[in-house]
Image: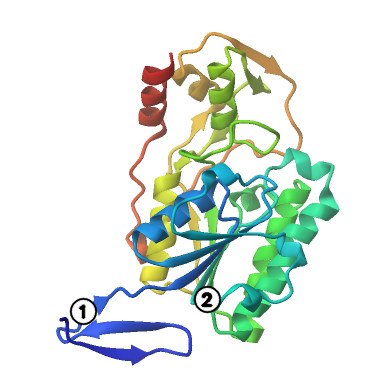
Amino acid sequence: MVKVDWVVKDEKRYKYINLEGEEIKVKKNILVTGGAGFVGTNLVKRLVEEGHNVTSIDNYYTGLKENHQDGVTYIEKDICEIEDYSDYGDFDLVYHLAAIARIQPSFKLPIEYFEANSMATFKLAMYCAKNKIPLQFAGSSSHHSGKFKNPYTFSKDVSEEIVKLCQKHYGLDATITRFYNVYGPYHLKEGGYCTVIGKWEHAIEDGQPITIYGDGTKRRDFTHIDDIVDALVLIQDKDAWGQLFELGRGVNYSIKEVADLFEYDNIIYEDDKPGEAITTLCEDTIAKEVLGWNPKKNLTDYIKNYVSRHL
């Protein structure tokens, strides 16, 4: 039996320390909003593997029940309708991933984006502040293209400001993360909310052309989901609150270069889409300095593996 002493940090967060002064991880009750979506599924899978009790709240607008992981409690509910999260459990930590994503659909649904991405975030942040529950909030790297570029970016930018407001005036412990063009297992392959990598994989598997919008010179910093999850877990492990972490691989490719990696000849070009950035590239090093985060997975290796299995 391990002898431990323990230190209460506050009502919600605590650590167990052994007699050698080393921290011992303890099981936490963790809420993940959007836990049946792409990022959420990969995150809850890791959290369960680490021994935590995990609850997901998802309205399945883009989340999928086929993504369900053993050991997770899944609640089908729209966060816009939730006033008090304590109805669903007593939580030690919240990962807020739920949002209506993607730029193009936001032009047709600006009010819905604001309600889901901004107002629902405000209610959740206030709940966390009141109950002294630390919050990890997923912002958006589209911030760098300007918050008025499209309704999606505006709604996420306002949400970041809401989190900062609650930190300053309501005692919220929170950290904001911005993801760069995430890809990997469980990404959507169909519909208007899928990533370009997922959409192209679906087209290839169906023998259909892949579509490039514009001339293919736009550049994107593609980041593997495993690296994103590593960072999200490191934040809670290191109690790295009050931070804003840019989570990108730090290498970008033109859309044409990515298409060439697939070695697929059936490509069509269509008119460019409005509201999109010309270039995304993570040059911020704070996550590496504070967390020791070092993204390891490369887009080229991922696509080579995909091509070897499907072409």
Residue 27 image point, x, y percent: 37, 73
Query: In the depicted view, which residue is nearer to us: 131 or 119?
Result: 131
Image quarter where the N terminus lies is bottom left
Residue closest to the eye, 142 or 202: 202
Where is 208 relative to 172, above or below? above
Residue 74 location in percent, x, y?
Answer: 57, 59
The residue labelled by disc 2 is 91
Q: Is mark 2 on a helix, strand or loop?
A: loop
- Can residue 158 be seen from the camera position used here? no
Residue located 37% across and 36% down the image:
298
Q: How far apart are marks 2 and 1 (CA)?
A: 25 Å
User: Crowding at label 1, few (<14), some or many (≥20) Cα neighbours within 10 Å?
Assistant: few
Residue 226 picture location, percent across and down? 40, 47
The amino acid type, in three-letter code, at marker 2 is Phe
Compare marks 2 and 1 and give the one earlier in the sequence. 1
State the image quarter where residue 98 is shown.
bottom right
Point out the image quarter for the C terminus. top left
Name the element at disc 1: loop
Residue at which label 1 appears: 22
Q: Would you place residue 183 above or below residue 288 in this image?
A: above
Q: Write the residue at 58% across / 48% down.
A: 37
Q: What residue type is labelled 1?
A: Glu
Q: Which of 93 and 113 is in front in this view?
A: 93
Does 245 sit above or below residue 203?
Answer: below
Looking at the image, the residue that sits furthest to the top is 265
Q: Which residue appears at 60% of the width and 78% of the height? A: 128
